[in-house]
Amino acid sequence: MRSPISSLERSAPQLTFGSIALAVVTLACLYLHAHFAATAFAYLLVVLLFSLMGSFIASSALCIIAIAALAYYFAPPAFSLRIDDPQDLPVVVAFFIASIVGAHLIGKLRQEREAARVVAAKLQRSAADLEDRPSRFRPGSRRSWNDHRGSRHAW
């Protein structure tokens, strides 16, 4: 099991760089006067790309930061966390679900990939062990199995 400190060390760069990327996307979307849904999609791309880096906790935190920025800057009334337009609420819910599910699936994929690497390493060690065994244990050897077990009489 991972220690909380190693988990924090792994999450900190992801959260830091992800927050910077969200800030850059926010500034770009404000400059371009992007629509609410287009900004949500840009945020979703950032959250999913940074979830490739590692921690599910950091990805969830990025998701919450993105929702707060989305509501604060792009949902009417501007510069408030309140969302007055009922058409914007499904966008926020869809964004939240897609980013959390995507981050979870990416995390599961990473775990499965690591498990496959462990199994592949074990398989390679087993294959190497089989190749290193003397030929007397291989099928078709001239000596019988009893000779290898130490018995000197024939059955």
Image (tube, rainbow, N blue to C red):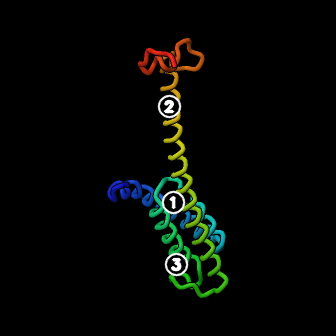
Q: Earlier in the sequence, mark 2 or mark 1?
A: 1
- Residue at point 53% right, 16% down? 144
What residue would you read off at disc 2?
126
Label 3 element class: helix
Residue 64 at what x, y percent from top left? 49, 71
Q: Cα distance, mark 2 to mark 1?
A: 45 Å
Q: CA distance from mark 3 to mark 2?
A: 57 Å
Which quadrant would the N terminus be assigned to in this image?
bottom left
Nearer to us in this view, 15 or 141: 141
Determine whether the residue tagged by mark 2 lies in a helix, strand or loop: helix
Mark 1 lies on residue: 21
Q: Which residue shows up at 51% across the image and 60% down it?
A: 21
In three-dimensional space, the C-alpha distance between marks 3 and 1, rounded to whole angstroms, equals: 17 Å
Contact (Cβ within 8 Å) of mark 3 with mark 2: no
Position in image of residue 131 (x %, y %): 52, 22
Choose the circle earlier in sequence order: 3 or 2.
Answer: 3
In the image, 24 versus 140, the foreground residue is 140
Tell me if residue 54 comes above or below residue 44 in the rendering.
Answer: above
Residue on which disc 3 sits: 72
Tell me where residue 45 appears, x and y as whole percent.
Answer: 60, 61
